[in-house]
Image: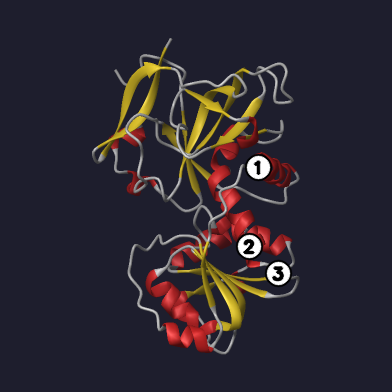
């Protein structure tokens, strides 16, 4: 059977027809119904022979009956380094989780990369209850989940945003009270943070560094600003501040199940914008489609798509 997938060709993302994904007998074959867009995907290095994309939700169409995985017909969410933007995806058991009945597929599809990054980044910082954490890019896909998870851990959270529009977005969606949200320009160097989770980089990080407590860690999760920053390493060394990159890309099933449970319990809200049909991804520059929160797209099961 021929299926449709999205591949990167030169600087374009485009539909191509082809056979289904290579399917290991122990893997689960999923008919994809929703995919999401992450900030790192427009500039990622994609293999020419594999469909692009990291996050996808869908329904199981093949599953090894000897395994302890989901049954055929089960709703699942999947993660992987490629292969998500396709009508079918083959996924190892350790990179998927069943979606609770109360969680919409659109929300599930938006969760993997952003949710796993947020959860594991907080763990990596290793802060304890009551300590102060600053989160840049707090209205983004990762950031809006970090601020909620950090608050659930009883950390003293300060969301950092670069615009009034982002501040209002957090307030209007009841993610954080206005009094706790800070514009970059409002940072107070006398109010020191015990840890920083930085998604933005560039000048935003430069403005934030003077507010980092001696001995604290700044965890670099991304660089969405795409702007350069020069750092005085001697100053960092004198203050014993650690600048560390996030690098936890372990298998996902256990953490995905935890995140989905938090969503089902109402302890975590994934704000996902409906981007419509996935053909939009081939018609517009991906960077233009990235919004506050996350954006998801519907994948119709129609082999004629893209012809």
**Position of residue 11 in the picture relative to residue 51 (left or right):** left
Q: How is the image coloured?
A: secondary structure
Which residue was labeled with disc 2? 124
Vertical placement of 245 versus 272: above or below? below
Determine crowd level at label 1: few under 14, some 14-19, many 20+ residues with C-alpha closer than 10 A. many
Q: Is residue 173 visible?
A: no
The front one of 132 and 83 is 83
Q: Tell me where residue 210 appears, x and y as whole percent.
A: 49, 85
Q: Tell me where residue 302 appears, x and y as whole percent.
A: 42, 15
**Position of residue 81 in the picture relative to residue 119 (left or right):** left
Name the quadrant containing residue 72: top right
Determine crowd level at label 3: few under 14, some 14-19, many 20+ residues with C-alpha closer than 10 A. some
Q: CA distance from mark 3 to mark 1?
A: 22 Å
Q: Tell me where residue 191 appears, x and y as whole percent.
A: 59, 85
Q: Tell me where residue 218 appears, x and y as whole percent.
A: 54, 72
Q: Count the labels in the image.
A: 3
**Position of residue 266 in the picture relative to residue 87 (left or right):** right
The N terminus - image quarter: top left
Q: Earlier in the sequence, mark 3 or mark 2?
A: 2
Q: Earlier in the sequence, mark 1 or mark 2?
A: 2
Q: Is residue 272 visible?
A: yes
Mark toward the viewer: 3 or 2: 2
Which residue was labeled with disc 1? 256
Mark toward the viewer: 1 or 2: 2
> Element under label 1?
helix
Q: Which mark is residue 155?
A: 3
Q: CA distance from mark 1 to mark 2?
A: 17 Å
- Residue at (42%, 73%) from the top-left corner? 204
> Element under label 2?
helix
Vertical placement of 249 versus 237: above or below? above
Vertical placement of 77 versus 236: above or below? above
> Element under label 3?
loop
């Amino acid at each position: 059977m021929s299926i449709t997938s999205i591949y990167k060709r030169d600087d374009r993302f485009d539909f191509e027809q082809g056979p289904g994904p290579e399917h290991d007998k122990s893997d689960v074959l999923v008919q994809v119904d929703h995919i999401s867009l992450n900030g790192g995907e427009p500039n990622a290095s994609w293999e020419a022979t594999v469909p692009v994309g990291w996050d996808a939700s869908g329904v199981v169409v093949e599953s090894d009956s000897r395994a302890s995985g989901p049954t055929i017909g089960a709703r699942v969410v999947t993660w992987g380094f490629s292969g998500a933007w396709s009508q079918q995806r083959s996924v190892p058991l350790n990179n998927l989780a069943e979606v609770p009945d109360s969680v919409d597929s659109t929300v599930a599809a938006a969760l993997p990369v952003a949710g796993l990054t947020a959860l594991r980044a907080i763990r990596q910082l290793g802060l304890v209850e009551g300590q102060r954490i600053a989160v840049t890019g707090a209205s983004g896909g990762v950031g809006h989940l970090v601020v909620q998870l950090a608050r659930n851990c009883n950390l003293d959270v300060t969301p950092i945003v670069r615009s009034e529009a982002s501040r209002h977005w957090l307030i209007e969606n009841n993610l954080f009270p206005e009094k706790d949200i800070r514009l970059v320009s409002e940072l107070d160097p006398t109010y020191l943070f015990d840890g920083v989770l930085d998604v933005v980089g560039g000048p935003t990080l430069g403005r934030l560094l003077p507010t980092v407590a001696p001995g604290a860690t700044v965890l670099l999760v991304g660089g969405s600003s795409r702007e350069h920053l020069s750092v005085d390493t001697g100053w960092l060394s004198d203050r014993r501040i650690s600048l560390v990159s996030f690098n936890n890309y372990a298998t996902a099933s256990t953490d995905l199940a935890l995140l989905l449970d938090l969503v089902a319990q109402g302890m975590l809200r994934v704000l996902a914008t409906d981007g419509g049909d996935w053909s939009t991804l081939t018609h517009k520059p991906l960077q233009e489609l990235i919004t506050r929160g996350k954006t998801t797209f519907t994948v119709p099961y129609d082999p004629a798509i893209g012809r």
